[in-house]
Image: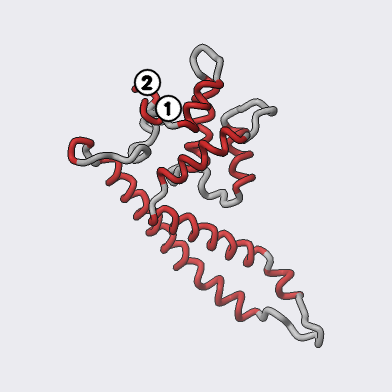
Amino acid sequence: MKNHELTVREEVWGLAPFAKLLARDKTKDKVRAHNEMLFIWHYCDIRSDYQHLTDDKERAAEIKKDLKLPTSWKVDTAMQTAVDCYKRGSSTVVQTLYKQTLMSASAIGKYLANTEALLAERDVQGKVVTDIAKITSSVQKVPKLMADLKAAYKEVIKEQEEMDNRKKGSRTMNTFEDGFNMDEI
């Protein structure tokens, strides 16, 4: 994404999964292929505003709704292949670790959201399973977790910006290192 516009480099369309999306689009301006690439970017890219949705189905549904894709549109085999290709080509160890950390933080949030049920839970002898001390201890650790997540996100974005700012003349770039660029096709 550059200036809120999706750009896809020409060589990306040469990769089989993306070429298939382009070839099946019979619209004059390749609107369907463009929207499918937007979906892929928002679904996969670490810089997408949808990455906080850690449930894949929920994230896909939100993106589909916000892109105003037809109700009949779905992630079919061709789209899934393109999504998998983008993920393989654009993920770094740092990004993968950050996404895994987000999923862990989300699970912690779900645990804390279930406090009432946790406090009401009893074992077979009637004793409290999760006492208040465990929950309050967890709550006290949340600000540190939030700060750590913010710091991790900054590191991921810093890494991405470093990759974006590399000059192609200095070394060979990986296909997705500077995203899609549709202006060059």
In the image, what residue type sits under mark 1? Trp
Q: Give the left or right position of residue 102, taking residue 126 as reference.
A: left
Q: Residue furthest left?
A: 170
Residues at discs 1 and 2 in contact (Cβ within 8 Å): yes
Residue 31 point in image, percent of width and height: 52, 20
Relative depth, front residue between 171 and 163: 171
Q: Secondary structure at mark 2?
A: loop
- In depth, the one of 46 and 37 nearer the eye is 37
* Pointer 1 local density, CA inside 10 Å: few below 14, some 14–19, many at least 20: some
What amino acid type should be assigned to the residue bearing mark 2?
A: Ile
Say which element carries label 1: helix
In percent of the image, x 58 and y 65: which residue is there? Answer: 108
At x 76%, y 75%, the residue is: 120
Q: Is residue 1 above or below residue 70?
A: below
Query: Which mark is nearer the camera, 1 or 2?
Result: 1
- Position of 161 relative to 24 (above/below): below
Left or right: residue 115 compared with residue 97: right
Residue 104 percent coordinates (x, y): 54, 62
Report x, y in % for residue 2: 36, 32
Q: Earlier in the sequence, mark 1 or mark 2?
A: 1
Residue 5 seen in the figure: no
In the shown orientation, is residue 6 left or right of residue 111?
Answer: left
Residue 185 numbered tag: 2
**Residue 171 in picture, x, y percent from top left:** 21, 41
Residue 124 higher or lower than 73, as above or below:
below
Task: Using the rendered view, name the quadrant where residue 109 is placed.
Answer: bottom right
The residue where tag 1 is placed is: 13
Gap between marks 1 and 2, in whole Å? 9 Å
Residue visible at 68% across and 79% down in the picture: 130
Residue 38 vs residue 121, the one in the foreground: 38
